[in-house]
Image (cartoon, grey):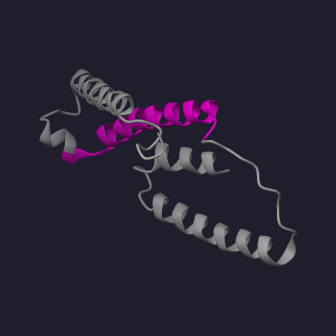
Amino acid sequence: EIVMQFCFVNLFGVAFPITGLLALISNLVEIVVDSRKLCFHTRRPFAQRASSIPDMWMKILKCVALFGVVTNIVIVLTNSSAVTDFLNITEEDGTQLWTAMFVFEHLLVAFIVIFWQITSSEPRRIK
């Protein structure tokens, strides 16, 4: 459920900017409802150890983040006249638009991959 919400916010957040706020409100309501349910309506659950997010889910979230970069760049460059005016791209010249999308997408994907490589999944104090 949370991964699906992350997918929607990441992939289509630029098309409907209030999506992030709606997701936050939804998560806060879910926390309150789940805490009431755990405190008053069910027995205490047994604790289960988990070191972190399983590797498969982390791979899925990383793929969604990369696809989000591509979809958001395509949405912004095809629908925003401010960006095309700034880059001096005319609507008749589609090759310039696709070239700009290709360059921006590759720059952002390279930045994200470099960021993932230099950051650790575990904080220093835990190691």
**Depth check: 20 or 86 in front?**
20
Region rendered in magenta:
53-82
Name the residue rendered at 61%, 31% in the picture.
55
The picture quadrant where one finds residue 53 is: top right
**Depth check: 110 or 18 in front?**
110
Q: State the count of labels.
A: 0
Whether residue 99 is in magenta: the answer is no
Question: Horizontal and vertical percent for residue 72?
Answer: 39, 40
Q: Main secondary structure of the magenta part?
A: helix
Specify whether 99 is left or right of 54.
left
Whether residue 75 is in magenta: the answer is yes
Specify whether 42 is left or right of 31.
right
**Depth check: 41 or 23 in front?**
41
Name the residue rendered at 50%, 50% in the picture.
9
Question: Horizontal and vertical percent for residue 124?
Answer: 40, 43
Question: Horizontal and vertical percent for residue 32?
Answer: 66, 74
Residue 5 in the image: above or below residue 92: below
Specify whether 78 is left or right of 46.
left
Specify whether 125 is left or right of 8.
left
Question: Horizontal and vertical percent for residue 43?
Answer: 87, 69
Name the residue rendered at 37%, 36% in the picture.
119
**Depth check: 36 or 96 in front?**
36
